[in-house]
Image (tube, grey):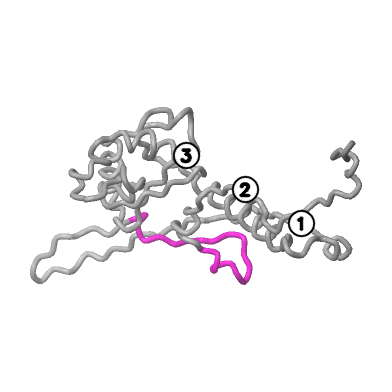
Amino acid sequence: NTYAAADFAGVFPEIWSSFMNWQYESSLFAAKFFLDLSADIQNGGDVINIPDLFTNVFSASDKSIGSEVTLLSPASQSAALTVNTWKETSFLIEDMQAAAILKSQNLQKGLAEKASYTVAKALDSSLLALATGLATIVNDSASDVTDPDIRNALAQMDEDDVPSEDRGFFFHPNVVWQDLFGIAKYYDAATLGLSRGPVVTGQIPSLYDVPIYKTTNVDATLTS
């Protein structure tokens, strides 16, 4: 007539592991990729005015020997960026609870890292959401991305004289795995001149020398 587990319920210890589960987090790229003007308002201000030199451009005038030059005075304008979004993630642990928390878990450090990531993700998501306001659109989010789409997008940037070093593709993982990896020229190692192609490495680092950033922060419709 041995003891049952229920008989020892009052003396069985519960063990709290020093290991802590962390939520999987999305990759953050946008804040590092785009121009950051935060330093301009470190000493105050709620509007950043950016003067431009392209609204009214110069023109080349004909010149003959002995004639005066044609003076130009193209007007300049400025773009105003209004600082109107405030994000915060806050928490408070009082001294009594802080003294009672299991120290090996370093909970306060973990919460601080989680809070900072939450704000950083909000920034990345806000930046990438601005894509819906772009004037030039190629394809749509409900259709598969094809190689002609990629080349069309690059051609559009060439036509607008966008510097190559300022370019990047931001793709949702569904697009990378379901669309890009379905295009033979993108994954065929022989076509790429590689001994280890994307199917082996699991990565398509760039397309036509434009880097690829894969993140779930990109808005997606349906499976694309």
| The one of 33 and 117 positioned closer to us in this rendering | 117
Residue at 57 percent across and 52 percent down: it is 123
Q: Which of disc 1 and disc 2 is earlier in sequence?
A: 2
| Cβ atoms at labels 2 and 1 below 8 Å apart | no
Q: Is residue 31 left or right of residue 60?
A: right
Residue type indicated by callout 3: Thr
Q: CA distance from mark 2 to mark 1?
A: 18 Å
| Cβ atoms at labels 3 and 2 below 8 Å apart | no
Quadrant of the rendering where the C terminus is positioned: top left
Q: Residue furthest left?
A: 65
Q: Is residue 207 magenta?
A: no
Residue 23 tag number: 2
**Image coords of residue 158 (percent x, y):** 26, 48
Q: CA distance from mark 3 to mark 2?
A: 29 Å
Residue at 65 percent across and 50 percent down: it is 21
The stretch in magenta equals 37-56
Please, what secondary structure does the residue beneath circle 3 have? helix
Q: Which of disc 1 and disc 3 is earlier in sequence?
A: 1
> Which residue is tagged 3?
132
Residue type indicated by callout 1: Phe
**Image coords of residue 206 (percent x, y):** 31, 50
Is residue 141 at least partly visible in the picture? yes
Q: Is residue 208 left or right of residue 24?
A: left
Q: Residue furthest front?
A: 1
Q: Nearer the viewer, mark 2 or mark 1?
A: 2
> Which residue is tagged 1?
91
